Amino acid sequence: MKIHYLQHVDFETPDTLLDWAEERGHGLSATRLFAGERLPGLQDIDLLVIMGGPMSVNDENQYPWLAGEKSFIREAVEQGCRVLGICLGAQLLASALGAKVNANPQKEIGWFPVSLTPEGKQSRVFYGFEPVFTTFQWHGDTFDLPQGTTLLATGEVCANQAFQFGEHAFGLQFHMEVSQKGVKGLIEHGGDELVSAPFIQTAEQMLQSGEYEENRENLFRFMDELSR
């Protein structure tokens, strides 16, 4: 399988998703939008992965490439390409499908539980998952559900955590791909967000969490099903 990912900042990489791709023997390429790289043709992409980032999908004046990226994502979905959006990537996918993206009532930063909906429990991509599982979050925005999508997972402070559009497009508000090194990078670049709030953990809480291995296993399980 040929996998291509869109990267928005240098410190938010596919992380353990790279490990999964290497172990499964998949080809991998990237467009680093923050570095001015051009979007590729879709004909050579089997799975498009849209990574996270600290900007908003609505920041087109500051990041003009966002408009072209959303058009590219919409075209990928229309052509039946497998698409996975992670955090900002899920918001970009939702926006590309016509939904609004706005501030969540509260920022959610750290390790928090996510609950599968009845539809999520039946979804092939969440096969083998616990009905409630803990995963990593770092976001201030949330997305409305695009018309025609199915909500697969929800959370206490952020209702829309995972959705499916058609057979092959999925958005995940949370990060199953982060390693401890990846979280360190997020803390280094976004430490000013770590204020005292109900759904914001300290750097120590995030780094010392015992959830990393299970999060990685869940990512591998999810990606194995998505790539079938």
Image (tube, rainbow, N blue to C red):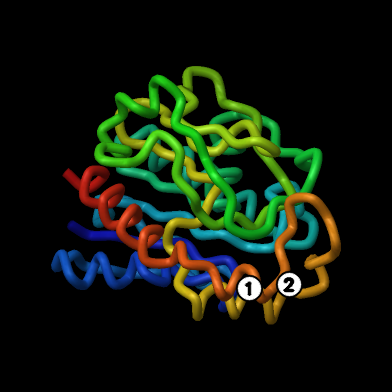
Q: Quadrant of the N terminus?
A: bottom left
Q: What residue is disc 2 on?
A: 190
Q: Quadrant of residue 143?
A: top right
Dot 1, how many residues are within 10 Å of its Cα: few (below 14), some (14-19), or many (20+)?
Answer: some
Q: What label does residue 186 carry, if any?
A: 1
Front one among 116 and 144:
116
Q: From this view, report whether residue 121 is shown above or below residue 21.
A: above
- Residue 44, compared with residue 165, is above or below; it is below
Q: Residue at x 42, y 71 (%)?
A: 15
The amino acid on which the numbered mark 1 sits, given as a three-letter code, is Leu
220 in relation to 96, above or below: below
Q: Amino acid at mark 2?
A: Gly
- Residue 213 x/y as whole percent: 37, 66
**Left or right of residue 6, residue 62 in this image:** right
| Towards the viewer: 86 or 39 | 86
Left or right? Give the position of 227 relative to 101. Answer: left
- Does residue 35 appear anywhere in the picture? no
- Residue 186: quadrant of the picture: bottom right
Kindly check if marks 2 and 1 are in contact, taking CB atoms under 8 A apart as contact: yes
Identify the residue at horizontal 21%, vertical 50% (top origin): 224
